[in-house]
Image (cartoon, rainbow, N blue to C red):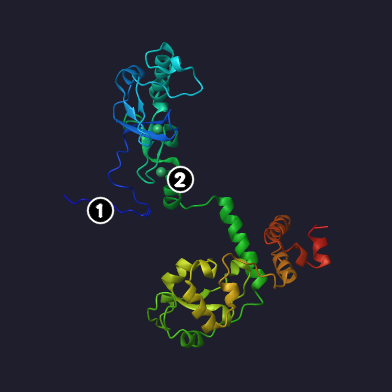
Amino acid sequence: MTRRKKVNNTGILRVGGIPYHDAWVAYKCVNCKKMNYVRVGQQLLTPKEAIETAVWKCEHCGFIHSKESDLPFDNWEEKYNSADSTTALRFWEGFFRIATEHPESYWKQCNVCTRILPFNAFSKHSGWGPLERQMECRSCKGAINAVLNPKRTKEQLHESAVRRRIADLFLEEENEPIDFQDLFDRFNSRCFKTKKPLDINKRDTWAIDHILPSKYLYPLKRENAALLSRNANENKRDKWPSKFYTNNELIELARITGANIDLISNKHPILNRNIDVNKGVERYLQVREKSDLHKRIKEIKKILLVYDLVNNLSPANKKLLGFE
Ligand SMILES: [Zn+2]
Ligand SMILES: [Zn+2]
């Protein structure tokens, strides 16, 4: 019998050895007020069992939580704190009831982030352990789902496509054709990231990195182009250079291309405002007869607001788009 190999396509690993079906009790020490977690396993406690049998020792201060213990409350009269008193017994009954009376009172350990979290931090999964909850907490679940199912909503996709198209239109006349041979010469025919040799004739194995991305409105020019293997470029994509290249690589890159080291090493993206916004707007509005002009006006207005470029518009275009 062949066993199918389990492929982990999330890259987010579960941590081995976590008793993820076990229930935990969590409580704040009545003495030092620090959190404690008691693993109770697959059998939930009833409040009655807990009050009769539990001896929970605080792992921080050593205080024993049990109905035999005197209470440590300075603001109570001394006699109420004594374990022999009815007040203390009632307190302990309440203490153990709170910790154990419902499944919802319990805690559980996530086998992805390993945190011990309240019952409600886990989504339901019938038949799994006494709490019938999933093995990963909801934050990890969300992260895992995002990797497994990266599809964005239709709206988000449309929005980013519009944004890309508008960025391209803004840059259309500023992009320059790249001389491939010159690019290979300057980068010694190697991927700048991996240093692997590249063959200029195998066009599908290499790519031109738009060092400062078009997303931030930088045109493709000789000083904004780096040679990368196709794989490396797929990792780089729209990333701001300092988020992809190491410091040494940034220095080397500036040396090779003449790029502005100050700009490419900046921690956060800086938008290029040095572009002809008016030309871009005009190109965007010169549309096919059938397209929805009203929608396009709305789209470009939004992009101009997002990019904070409204003030780069000519008075005529500002008026045309209804910005004043
Ligand atoms: Zn304590
Ligand atoms: Zn988690």
Q: Earlier in the sequence, mark 2 or mark 1?
A: 1
Position of 221 relative to 104 (above/below): below
Q: Amino acid at mark 2?
A: Gly
Q: Quadrant of residue 46?
A: top left
Q: 60 or 275: which is nearer to us?
A: 60
Residue at 24 percent across and 51 percent down: it is: 4
Residue for badge 2: 142
Q: Position of residue 239 (x, y in %)?
A: 53, 66
Position of 8 relative to 186 (above/below): above
Q: Residues within 10 Å of mark 2 (few under 14, many from 20)?
A: few
Farthest left residue in view: 1
Q: How many marks?
A: 2
Residue 5's disc number:
1
SS class, disc 2: helix
Mark 2 vs 1: CB contact within 8 A: no
Q: Would you say 281 lies left or right of 246 here?
A: right
Compute the Cα span from label 2 to label 1: 25 Å
SS class, disc 1: loop
Position of 276 relative to 156 (above/below): below
